[in-house]
Image: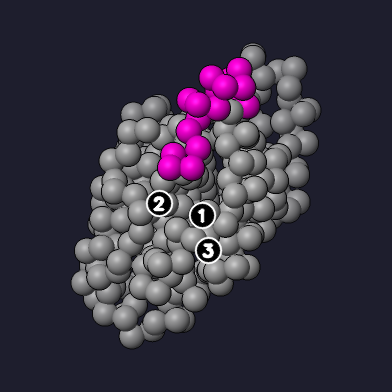
Amino acid sequence: MAFGQVVIGPPGSGKTTYCNGMSQFLSLIGRKVAVINLDPANDALPYDCAVNIEDLIKLSDVMNEHSLGPNGGLVYCMDYLEKNVDWLQSKLEPLLKDHYLLFDFPGQVELFFLHSNAKNVIMKLIKKLNLRLTAVHLVDAHLCSDPGKYVSALLLSLSTMLHLELPHINVLSKIDLIESYGKLAFNLDFYTDVQDLSYLQHQLDQDPRAAKYRKFTKELCDVVQDFSLVDFTTLDIQDKESVGNLVKLIDRTNGYIFAGVESSAVEFSKIAVRPVDWDYYRVAAVQEKYMKDDENFDNDN
């Protein structure tokens, strides 16, 4: 049995940076890591990848040969990968015994809530190779500063969770930059815990651009709340404590912590993580660290 992460998220959410930082962190705590690049548009990799989809198919070749744009080309590449999943399986088999796997997927969001080819690739690998994978869905933290964009991120996260059917963690990435995008209307736990979204309606009502979409936005918020599945954790990929807390969460969801209890305990004794793992205190600590002027929030949740 092998363990790993499926790293997904919209363009610019930090997937490649995440894979680079996470692989370095896991190596420091004693794990052998293999990064698998499955993004055929990712031609400037900051990490050494064990498997690269460009050895099978290149997006530029597909676009030129079939006169496709980047979106259509990515769908074609994922479809081609699905049909040639045996190639990927053969590349992964030598890594399964002692490597932790990080799959760096493309940033085209339609691949993970609309099309089935990426999901089919993942499911075939899980079945054939006995993998235990967690989907790590990155969302740029700056979306919290715009109520409309935040609602969109919620809906995208929910759709992706339902479509992939994997253990799933939604992450607000680049949390260290959150205040550079503008003040948040609420405390951070409002956005991480996805609390009463009716408060967002009041924020949207102040935006004349959103007036004609008010009813539609309310319906979307109701859908998210009715499913009651979406929440977020936070990440600063350059902060050891932040990455360590996320690794602990991922290890619980994919079962790594139960497969090697002793080794996990040794690993985490080497890093500075808070002994209290309650979400309330974790989010409060993040807010205190990155959002200094919390007294200026419009609403204290």
Which label belongs to residue 151?
none
Across and down, in percent, residue 14 comes to 40, 39
Specify which label sits upstream in the sequence, 3 or 2: 2
The span shown in magenta is: 54-72
301 and 27: which is toward the camera? 27
Compared to 196, does 131 lie above or below? below
Q: Amino acid at mark 3?
A: Leu
Read off the residue under disc 3. Answer: 133
Which label belongs to residue 88?
1
185 and 12: which is toward the camera? 12
* Residue furthest out toward the top: 208
- Secondary structure category for the residue under label 2: strand
Across and down, in percent, residue 143 comes to 50, 33
- Majority SS type along the magenta span: helix
Q: Compute the Cα span from label 1 to label 3.
A: 16 Å
Q: Residue at x 40, y 74 (%)?
A: 97
State yes or no: discs 1 and 3 in contact (Cβ < 8 Å).
Answer: no
Specify which label sits upstream in the sequence, 1 or 2: 2
Disc number lying in front (3 or 2): 2
Q: How packed is label 2: few (under 14 Cα within 10 Å), some, or many (20 or more)?
A: some
State yes or no: discs 1 and 2 in contact (Cβ < 8 Å).
Answer: yes
Q: Amino acid at mark 2?
A: Val
User: How many discs appear?
Assistant: 3
* Residue furthest out toward the bottom: 262
The answer to whether residue 63 of the structure is visible from this angle is yes
Quick check: is 58 in the magenta stretch? yes
Q: Amino acid at mark 1?
A: Leu
Which label belongs to residue 51?
2
